Each structure stands twice: as C-alpha cells, then as structure tokens.
Image: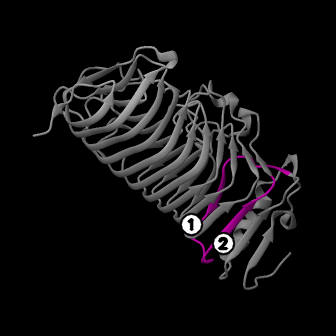
Amino acid sequence: MLDDVSSNVLNVMDFGAVGDGKTDDSQAFLKAWDKACTSWNPSTLVVPSDKSFLLRPVVTFQGPCKAPSIDFQIWGDILAPKSMSAWKKSDDTDHWIVFDLITGLSINGTGKIDGRGSSWWECREKHAIQINGCADFQMKGIKIFNSQQMHVAIDSCYGVQISDVWIVAPESSPNTDGIHIGSSKNVDISKSTIETGDDCISIGTGTSNVTISDIYCGPGHGISIGSLGKHGPAAVEQIYVYNCTFKGTQNGARIKTWQGGSGYAKDITFEDIILDSSDNPIIIDQYYCNGGDGCKNKTSAVKVSHVWFNNFRGTSSSKTAINLACSETVACEDIHLNHVHIMGVDSKEVVPYTLNVKGNMLDVKPEPYIKQKT
C-alpha cells in the first residue's frame, strides 16, 4: 500500500478488493476512497483492468475532501448486484453509487459501469450514479450500461464537464435517462453516444448555463428541457444544444411543461441538428402529463420564451414534424425557427401544428403558423 506522496496513487486491490465479479468489494472501494479523500495531496484512485468489481448499494464516496483533486480511474468493470433483494429497504436506496460534496473530482478511463437494472425497469426508481453537490467535476471515456433508472444524475453541482461517454440501455427500458441535470450551473456535455429508453439528456429546474454538443442520441426520447412545473416554480435558462444527431428517437429537441406550473424556461437554443427518422423532431409541449395526476386542465403555466430552433435537417417518422403546443393562457413568446428543413421518411407528407405561439421564422419546411413578433 502506498503512503502519501506528491501524487497519492491508490489501487483498490491494495485495500482488499477481489475483483471476481461475485465478492462484494464495496468496503475495499470505500477504504481506498477514505485514504484518497483525507490526503492533503492530489490523489488517484485506480480500478484496475481485466477485473470485475461487485459493489452493493448504497456506495457513497463522501466529501468534502482534504485532497485538492481526486482522479478516479476506472479501467475494469464495476457491477451492481442482479437481485433486487440486495437493495435493503432501510437504506437510502434511491441510488447505487453516490459522489457527494466533492471538489475537483474526475472520473475517467475505459472501464464499464453496469447497473444490471432490468429487474428495476418497471419500478420508476434507483439511479445508477448520483453526482451531488460537486464542483469542478469531470467525467470522460466511461461506459455506463443498463441503469436501474437514470444512468447519471447531476444535482446541485457547479462546473461539470462530461465527454466521450457511452451510455446504453435497451429502447424498451423505461425511465433510463442517459444524463439528467437538475439545480446545476455551468455544465458542458460533449462528444458522447447515448442510447436509452428515455431522454438521452434531460434538464430540470434550477439549471442554467448548459452547453450540449456533438451528441449521438438514439434510440431514446431526445434532448429535453423538463418536464417542468409539476413540483413548484420552474427556472431554466441559458441552454445551448448544437451539432447533435437524433436517430430513431421518440423526440428530437423538446421542451415539456405541466399545466398548472409557474416560472420560466428561456434563452434556449437548439442548432445544427441532424434528424434520422425521429418522431416529433421539434416539440414544445405545455400539456405534458404522464397520467399520474389525471391530466386535468389548468390555466397557469411555465412561461416559455426566447427559444431558437436553427438549422435542422433530416426526416420525421411522424406526420407532425413541428409541434408547438403552448398554453392557451400563457403564450410562448420569442420563438424563432430558422433554416429548418424536415421531410417525412420515404418522402411522406409532414405537417406543422402550432397553438398560441409568437415569434419569427425564416426558411422553414413544413411552415407553421407563428404570430409574428411586432
């Protein structure tokens, strides 16, 4: 076992990990983490290649840490238990792996994190990886498969960079969002492939200054702002999504809010988007409802404004290629569509649908009705 040096390198095998995919290695990981976290020097925690490490829930890598930075290198495989019985009801088992209140954490490598979550897919709970209250966080190169629900949930973080990740779950797996961002600022997600049964990336309330680029999304439900407004006032702004491809997705660029909500979603841009057989390529849905509350009509709504859809090209697998369904009482304002060319698959006819939308458009096919901004 290595002592603290100018760079503190810690291998989980030196702390009792077995790596046979059967033995619970949770305590070995936590012992290595404690050593890394309590060091005054930059630390590196190594999960070696050619081994599989079983981690039983909940594994919480707790901060704050004394170490100014921790490099969590994953070269082998990390596995969740297959059985639901491994998740004790007395535990805070909404999550499998948690990184909490850490500054300067990076997770990288070519290893695989496998949630083996198929038994949970009808239960609407259990996140694979929760990043909570972290600052200056980076994730690069990791493969994340078959989450119990959301693959990566980012909550209350500041300064997040995620790139070159591969997130995969079957198209039929419900609620398996690739990356969910909530209550966070200054987030950059790029150069990644996300294939899931729900949103490739979703953005929740309290989030601002997010850049998403060079994402291959599909299958999945697209890149979504929301849903917003179900649990109190919404606040989402300064979102920039560009150079993304949607293939065989249920949605493309989507903003979804609940009736009866309040607050705002504004300063949002989707730009340079390629569509390949996507349902609902462009959609603002202010009547979103998953059926749990009976979907009653309500007059208040989240205010959606200052939204740009620029340079969309490709095909829609649904007849309604542009669907802007805004609240009848709180109009969407400053909605701009520029250079949008969407055709039907096999040259089938596509149409737009609009309700209570104000803004401008230039070179849009199919051409929707938008009340021009004066």
User: Answer yes or no: do the residues labelled 1 and 2 have beta carbons within 8 Å?
Assistant: yes
User: Counting other residues with Cα less than 10 Å from the Cα at mark 1, is it few (<14), some (14-19), or many (20 or more)?
Assistant: many
Task: Tell me which numbered mark, 1 or 2, is placed earlier along the sequence.
Answer: 2
x 48%, y 30%: residue: 314
| Residue 356 in which image quadrant | top left
Classify mark 1: helix, strand or loop. Answer: loop
Which residue corresponds to mark 1? 102
For residue 19, side relative to residue 187 (left or right): right
Q: Amino acid at mark 2?
A: Cys
**Total count of labels:** 2
x 56%, y 63%: residue: 137
User: In what quadrant of the picture does the C terminus appear?
Assistant: top left
For residue 128, side relative to residue 340 (left or right): right
x 29%, y 25%: residue: 367
* Residues drawn in magenta: 52-76
User: Counting other residues with Cα less than 10 Å from the Cα at mark 2, is it few (<14), some (14-19), or many (20 or more)?
Assistant: many
Which residue corresponds to mark 2? 37
Residue lying farthest left? 374
Residue 47 image label: none
Q: Position of residue 217 (x, y in %)?
A: 56, 37
Classify mark 2: helix, strand or loop. Answer: helix
Q: Amino acid at mark 1?
A: Ile
For residue 359, side relative to residue 227 (left or right): left
Residue 62 lies within the magenta run: yes
